[in-house]
Image: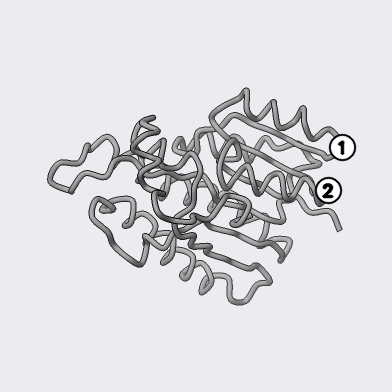
Amino acid sequence: MQKTILITGATAGFGLACANRFAGEGQRLILTGRRTERLQKFCNKHTTVPIHAVTLDVRVRKQVEAFINELPDDFSNIDVLVNNAGLALGMRGAQQADLNDWETMVDTNIKGLMYLTRFVLPGMVTRNRGHIINLGSVAGTYPYPGGNVYGASKAFVKQFSKNLLTDLVKTKIRVTNIEPGIAESEFSVIRFHGDKEKADQVYKGTTPLTPDDIA
């Protein structure tokens, strides 16, 4: 049975890997991201599956609401929501951290996930089916120096997922929180504001997970 799957942050990393995986299964995809050219590249590559790709900033509540309300009929009944959009910025201690970085992480990792969940859930409840998959992190459980707000945002994802289950216990909707450990993608490059040399040091001496492992 073909399902309609919405993936946020689908232009790189885990989101792109999930999109490739689901496209290979012939699922109907709704993909969002902030890099239009990457969304178009994906659509050009996967011409045999139905795809609705939208440039979207999950941090903007009105944008998210309009996006859900304006979905084409063929894509409006969402079966699976993959709340993947998220990021880490900086690794300074709390006393030196950039407040702009903190706010971006809160707006993306917490508020963006809240917005998508809140606007998608009513339809799932009406149909009494669906699956919400949240991308958390081991950082939400195990702290490390410089993890401060990033770790706290993933702790939110963990607790929010658990509380969603209590709200939905009388429905057939499932909630899953995936908590990857160290994984090599654009994640660290973004964290260090484009400094690939610093990003590469994160993985030195390790065999990290890959986006395909998570997908």
Q: Quadrant of the N terminus?
A: bottom right
Query: For mark 1, what is the residue?
Result: 48
Q: Quadrant of residue 103?
A: top left
Q: Quadrant of residue 65?
A: top right
Residue drawn at (83%, 48%) of the image: 26
| As drawn, 188 above or below 169 | above
Residue type, label 1 = Thr
Residue drawn at (49%, 47%) of the image: 184
Query: For mark 2, what is the residue?
Result: 26
Residue drawn at (71%, 66%) of the image: 128
* Residue lying furthest left: 95
Mark 2 and mark 1 in contact? Answer it, CB < 8 Å: yes
Query: How many labels sit on residues?
Result: 2
Direction from residue 83 to residue 51 in the image, left or right: right
* Residue lying furthest top: 37
Where residue 183 appears, as percent x and y from the top left, is 49, 52
